[in-house]
Image (cartoon, rainbow, N blue to C red):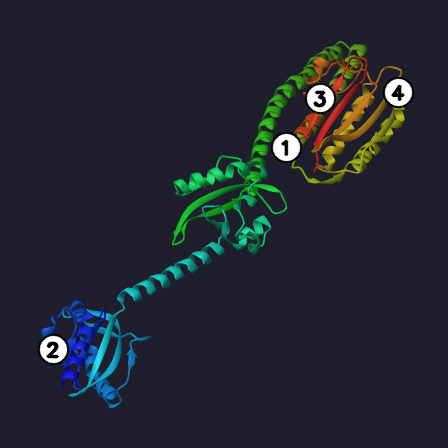
Amino acid sequence: MSFVRKSEDRFRLAVEAASAAMIVTDADGLIQFANAEVEHMFGYDASELVGKSIDILVPEAARRSHASLRQSFMANPSKRRMGIGRDLKATRRDGSEFPVEIGLAPITTEHGTSVLATIVDITARLDAENALRQRAFELERFRLAVEASPAAAIVADAEGLIQFANAETERMFGYVTADLIGKSIDILVPQAVRHTHGSLRQSFFANPSKREMGIGRDLKATRRDGSEFPVEIGLTPIVTEHGTSVLATIIDITARRDAEASLRQHASELERANERLAQFAFVASHDLQEPLRKVAAFSDLLREANAASNEAEMIHAINVIQASSLRARQLVDDLLAYSRTINDAQHLEDLDMREEIKCALNDLSEMINETGSQITADAPHLRFRADRIQFDRLMQNIVSNAIKYRKPGQSAKIHITAKFFDENSVRIAIADNGIGIEPKYATTIFEPFKRLHSRAHYPGTGIGLAICKSIADRHGWDLSVDSQLGQGATFFITIPVPS
């Protein structure tokens, strides 16, 4: 008897010292013993529990079925665990409920079989599990959002090692994601600025915050093939259990830059066109007045001669009126031609330089044969973009000008060459043996109706080279002349070509 008592005392001491809540009940569910942790967990004093039904610790909704569960256990007493994978709860003194796991163990004493219930409050564990599930959900949602982003998105750690890259990164940079993970972000940075990238990264992580990079700057990235392209980058710090990483959102702004360049070029063309049109209006009004004044003046003389029956004066007046009318018509035709080079839509296409020069010269064959001119051309089969009609007119105007301004008594000799001027452009040179011009007029000759010689010696309106200049400007080409008086002239057309 004394041995049994001692065993029960040792059992009570062990239960009392346990860190888990432990309760001993009899077969009817009456509480025989509760340790200190039960008091802490449920808010009862142990003296308040002893002799009470275990049901006071069971949620109200489950009490009805609890008696039958207890009877089932006592019918076949054995160690059992309850609450694992189930929503099992207990009730505190204040009526609040909390999740638990319970271990049941039968205890045989001199008074019969009792039950030792070990109760574990799993609130903290469930909160942690829920937090992990929420974190996993948020990470998956973040991954899906980043993966679906139309911008390249890369996550890198403080050392610049890539942890994640979305599908747009693969498309933009030409890498497979597996080739990027674990690599330094520096492989996407142009070689020329890699030496400074490490310090910039350190500066970011010293004070991590959302930042935008590349706006208003010439910021570039490097593809797998080594080609560079302009970008804008947004940096966002991401705090994880492993430390701070950075999400870099990268936008390829090549199309935007091209559009901006196109707009600037268009604005520049409009500005030049406006300048030419203003000059055009002034010159047109001035040059047209001369033949119209003559028509008016000699119409009066014709009337007077007719009244006086002066046949000679009448014929002279008629001849002057006719010549002035023809000149006015020629001026109007040339003005319309000049206007079209300013305003007509361009139809750019890929052309072969040698073939286009050949076609332009073929259209001048009659003029070349009549004047006995000698023309040679040495141009490569080189592709360039131009409006075919305007390029032909440009070449024809310069060549016909060279034939027109040949030295008296000599036939024109014209040599056309096309060579690379630099790695990005080709220069066409049209050299003649004509009368040449003084260097001080090298710019003036491209203005509308600017003439350096009298119409008696060299007829025309002076619009041909102005048309050439307008065509060159609209294409973004450079047109210039190198000449000395009496030593011929060489016209240069510098044309950008695809690399």
Q: Which residue is mark 3?
A: 328
Q: Quadrant of residue 110?
A: bottom left
Q: Could you tell which of marks 2 and 3 lies nearer the N-terminus?
A: 2
Coordinates of residue 34 in the picture (x, y in percent): 16, 75
At a point 53% along the width and 47% down the height, the residue shown is 184
Q: Is residue 389 visible?
A: yes
Q: Find out whether the residues at labels 3 and 1 contact each other: C-beta distance under 8 Å.
A: no
From mark 3 to mark 1, how far is it between C-alphas? 22 Å
> Residue 408: x percent and y percent?
86, 14
User: Disc 2 and disc 3: Cα gap in Å?
Assistant: 126 Å
Q: Earlier in the sequence, mark 2 or mark 1?
A: 2
Q: Taking 254 as reference, is 324 above or below it?
A: above
Counting from the top left corner in percent of width and height, residue 402 is at: 80, 22
Density class for disc 1 (Cα within 10 Å; few <14, some 14-19, many ≥20) is: few
Left or right of 223 in this view: 74: left
Instruction: Give the residue number, with chain letter if any, for mark 2.
Output: 50
Residue contact at pointers 4 and 3, CB within 8 angstroms? no
Q: Which residue is mark 1?
A: 343
Amino acid on which the number 4 mark rests in the picture = Ser
User: Is the residue under label 1 in contact with that under label 2 (CB below 8 Å)?
Assistant: no
Q: Amino acid at mark 3?
A: Ala
- Within the image, what quadrant is residue 323 found in? top right
Report the mark closest to the observer, 4 or 3: 4
> 363 or 110: which is nearer to us?
110
Give the label on residue 96, or none.
none
Question: According to the image, label 4 marks what residue?
Answer: 411
Q: Give the alpha-carbon distance from disc 2 to disc 4, as whole Å.
A: 133 Å
Say which label, 1 or 4, has the lower sequence index.
Answer: 1
User: Which of the marked residues, 3 or 1, is nearer the chain's N terminus?
Assistant: 3
Instruction: Classify residue 462 as left or right of residue 87.
Output: right
